[in-house]
Amino acid sequence: MNQNTPPSSSLPSPTGTGGRGDRTRRHNLSRVLTLLHRGAQRRSQLTSQTGLNRSTIAALVAELTELGLAYESEPDPTRQVGRPSPMVNADARTVAIAVNPEIDAITVGVVGLDGSLLKRIRYETEEPPTVSQFVKISSVIIESLRGEYETTGRIVGIGVAAPGLVRVEDGLVRWAPHLHWRDEPVSELLAEATGYPVSTANDASVGALGEHIYGAGRNIDDLIYLNGGASGIGGGIISGGRPLTGRAGYAGEFGHVRVENGAAEKGTREEGSLETEVNRADLLHALGLTNVDSETLDAALRESTDPAVSALVHRQLLSLGTSLRNAVNVLNPEVIVLGGFLASIFAFDPEFLIERVRSQSLEASFEGVQIVPAQLGADLLMIGAAELAFAALLEDPAAL
């Protein structure tokens, strides 16, 4: 159990709250819970950030506590001047299930309402799972978690981070090329198998959301996130503090941007694209590895002294730099966050990539741009996917 979990062993019943509220109260509950979801707050902080008076904040916190979504704790007296205000925390016993299918594994995680990853299970597969295999494996794992997390808390839903084009309105995976999924109703099928509401989005888009809320992009309104995984490279964009998804949710496919000019003559859609020039499989082959997680790959790159590995990484960084140059010139971000194996090759020679992007970008566009690794590491897609499941709760906590 997360260290911030309150001492009580059972949640209070939320019954009886449905008929009390009006639209303003429900809106204020949403505002307060969203702030708590992003980090514990003193009551006085909630008052200043929302502009509500102390008695209103007290009533809202009491209702969120009754709903099992928040609890109060004593602040650290050594860090306070004067009479300390109670700390209000999101209750980590309210959880979301996160699922990420890849070509070599299905990962399922449990994420608390406070943003903490409570559990992660990686189920390795010998080949890319079909949709039916994905649903069966995921539902079995989720069923094994049900008793543990519904005994003392609640599971609010499931978020799926899928490596492909996902229609945001209904979670239809239009095309996940490395999984060979086309027009698959992933949200609908997994909801039928588990009984929980399911939301599905592109994996890099949810990664961008996770880093924006909890990681390297915290308090940054304009950022680009690129994720490198076994299924290729995807991207997510936060613009003006909000996700930039495009009309149907397909924005951010940086992996399919052409970075090799000569490949245009070959006439295929993927030749010369970022994810054909920069890919995890080539790195694993050069390192003599097969099916490993991101931490193992990262460690292997750090420890390698093989000139062939160094040459490969620098070739990949050149292609990545070309893609990032284009992103800087088009989107003018404040921060570029690199996750997955892209963070690993960046760490191999960060100055090489930064100089490549700087020298190719418009001077004014690159001014102030930072290129940084994702802070959430291997937890990122779990935490980002959980945001999909928490969205409805944060929008209207009183709906419980």
Image (cartoon, grey):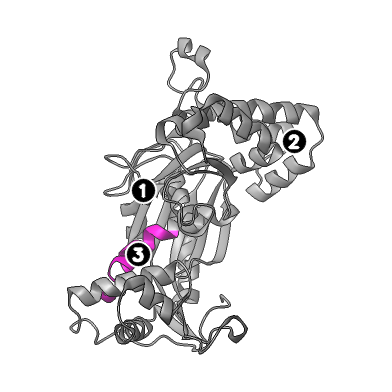
Question: In the rendered structure, which disc, 1 or 2, sits on the residue that comes first in sequence?
Answer: 1
Which element type, helix, strand or loop, lies under badge 3? loop
Is mark 1 in CB contact (under 8 Å) with mark 2? no
Q: Nearer the viewer, residue 299 or 55?
A: 55
Q: What residue type is labelled 3?
A: Tyr
Q: In this view, does 87 lie above or below 101?
A: below
How far across and how far down the image is residue 198, in percent?
35, 58
Q: State how far apart marks 1 and 2 are (Cα).
A: 43 Å
**Circle on res. 288:** 2
Labels in figure, total = 3
Q: In this figure, which residue is indicated by the disc labeled 1?
A: 240
Residue 116 in picture, x, y percent from top left: 53, 67
In this orientation, which residue lies closer to the viewer: 334 or 191?
334
Distance between mark 3 and mark 1 Cα atoms: 32 Å
Label 3: how many residues lie within 10 Å, few (<14), some (14-19) or many (20+)? some
Between the C-alphas of marks 2 and 3, the distance is: 41 Å
Asked which quadrant contains residue 389, the reply is: bottom left
